[in-house]
Image: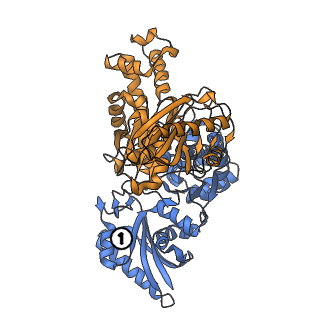
Chain colours: A orange, B blue
Amino acid sequence: MDIVAGIDIGGTKTKIGLVDNKGNNLIQTNFLTKDYIDLDDFLEKITTSIEELNNQLPQPATLLGIGVGAPNASSRRGTIEHAPNLVWKGVVPFLDKLKSKTNLPSKIMNDASAAALGEMLFGNAKDMKDFIVITLGTGFGSGIVANGQLIDGYDGFAGELGHIDLTLGDGRLTGLGVRGGLEAYVSSTGLKRTILYMLCKYMEDSRFRDIAYHDLHGEDITKAAEEGDPIALKAFDYTAKILGFALANFTAFTQPEAFFLMGGLANSGHWIFEPTQKYMEKNLLEIYKKKVKLLPSGMKEKNAAILGAAALIWKDFKNDV
Amino acid sequence: MDIVAGIDIGGTKTKIGLVDNKGNNLIQTNFLTKDYIDLDDFLEKITTSIEELNNQLPQPATLLGIGVGAPNASSRRGTIEHAPNLVWKGVVPFLDKLKSKTNLPSKIMNDASAAALGEMLFGNAKDMKDFIVITLGTGFGSGIVANGQLIDGYDGFAGELGHIDLTLGDGRLTGLGVRGGLEAYVSSTGLKRTILYMLCKYMEDSRFRDIAYHDLHGEDITKAAEEGDPIALKAFDYTAKILGFALANFTAFTQPEAFFLMGGLANSGHWIFEPTQKYMEKNLLEIYKKKVKLLPSGMKEKNAAILGAAALIWKDFKNDV
């Protein structure tokens, strides 16, 4: 059996799974990223973890390669650059180091771009040539496929749609006093900020008048909406309005057949999908109307990041998929 | 000698040229588009024009094919759809009709996308895989190249960046009461509208207080800027600020190596290039800073549209180019 290792490097956890050619994540493990401040120790941990996982599979299991999804990764240069949530600072030559350690085909990519490849190989975009995956978690990530290819950009940093600013520079800031862009509105964090905005703007009562910002959780906002909390309802509508407007704008760029939403905020289901679809449709140019789908990911969320990372390698063996 | 016919269909004029494999427009003609309300008459006029032009070239001259650039053209479907400035209404099966008349390899594409192909084959983008061409005339057109390929979109309408709206729906309208998008600000028309805005906002004197809107011309605004007219200077700065901001946003999409500006407003030269570069750089995400070029077209403007249209065919013979 042929397998590929998919690695998802996050600010908190690093997840590793072994994925077969159907997109089954056969076995997985994880550990705390920040326990490995030294990159060489981290790479050692990765390679021994892969070996341990592999030993638990029915043999023979042949490891074809290693795919890595990471924030601020340049697919073209094999680097992780200035990732604010990772312990390794500056420009990290991740891929060179990994390759010199394993001698296996290895690739690295922005995590959301990897998710787009995963969607194409193993998810709901199997027959699509033009689509965009949007990951709505703590932040807003994106991966763009056009003409059947993932768009890399000049040096591998294409697809940072969460940093597009629709306010001409007059909108919310990030924690660092920098212009926030869409991400500051449309993400789990953005939704929490919007709860504050609605509590400020309207005087209606809400359970959220008794909850401090730091105690707010995305799932609670969904639950409040289910129960008719007026502030939660307004917050979802506002979030969807901005996202729908943004998706209409994005359509004028690469005209995707579909947008896929995944991640924490996407798990709010119809509270986010239905109004977003409505606002997108309203704002689409005439030539795009009723042509753009808004879809959930076809990958089980638990495994999506690992599958995406594994897809980096599997796509080069795609005749077998 | 092998040649390709390049046809640029505009609201006013249709231009036809015969282009060799080096991008030389050997001979050309033009006529008024609206003189041919019947599409069959128009196609007849095209084919006889090509024949007449060809007869004037040193023989033998072999016509390899016909490339057409037109507004609202779908490259995937070969149609022109709901083009507001053309006399043929609805969905026009242009390519099918042309092919049945000539039996030659023929292609049609949005005019700005064709310009991007022209830039890649014959202009300043010869060695680039990721770039965006922006045509700033009466409107704002665009053609996007990523991974070395022109981006078509799901049904051939990608690259309508002039309709992206950075105002969350609160900006200028088009003539039809519809949301205007970038085009309403950044174009020859947009610059004229901005002159009015500046005359309204500021009380400084200006030659433009004596000129009615309908008598305003783009070249006069450039000339006024040269002479230090404060309203003209403010108008250029404002236009560049919005364009620079937009280009910074666009970079987060496909991360181009360069933006090429062409068309009437681009002819204002340093009045538009320098401040646009400044505002773009200011608004770029850290990972993009100092990596994105802002360049003039390498095609002579007079022929750019014809060369772009011819490039649709020449690219399929590109080993000869």
Question: Residue drawn at (63%, 57%), measured in percent from left and top?
Answer: B295
Q: Secondary structure at mark 1?
A: helix
Q: Is B104 above or below relative to A316? A: below
Q: Which residue is mark 1?
A: B35
Depth check: give the residue in front, B139 or B287.
B287
Residue A98 horizontal/vertical position (percent): 62, 45
Q: Residues within 10 Å of mark 1 (few under 14, many from 20)?
A: few
* Horizontal arrangement in the rendering, residue B80 relative to residue A97 (left or right): left
Question: Residue drawn at (46%, 62%), measured in percent from left and top?
Answer: B111
Question: Residue drawn at (33%, 71%), measured in percent from left and top?
Answer: B36
Chain to which mark 1 belongs: B
Location of the C terminus of chain B (image quadrant): bottom right
Depth check: give the residue in front, B38 or B21.
B21
Amino acid type of the residue that numbered disc 1 sits on in the rendered structure: Asp
Q: Is A54 above or below relative to B30? A: above
Q: Is residue A263 visible?
A: yes
Residue A238 horizontal/vertical position (percent): 41, 27
Question: Residue drawn at (43%, 53%), measured in percent from left and top?
Answer: B158
Residue B123 horizontal/vertical position (percent): 59, 67
Among all residues in the image, which is located at the extreme top? Answer: A210
Residue A38 horizontal/vertical position (percent): 68, 33
* Horizontal arrangement in the rendering, residue A3 relative to residue A172 (left or right): left
Q: Is A1 above or below relative to B40? A: above
Residue A222, image quadrant: top left
Among all residues in the image, which is located at the extreme bottom? Answer: B59
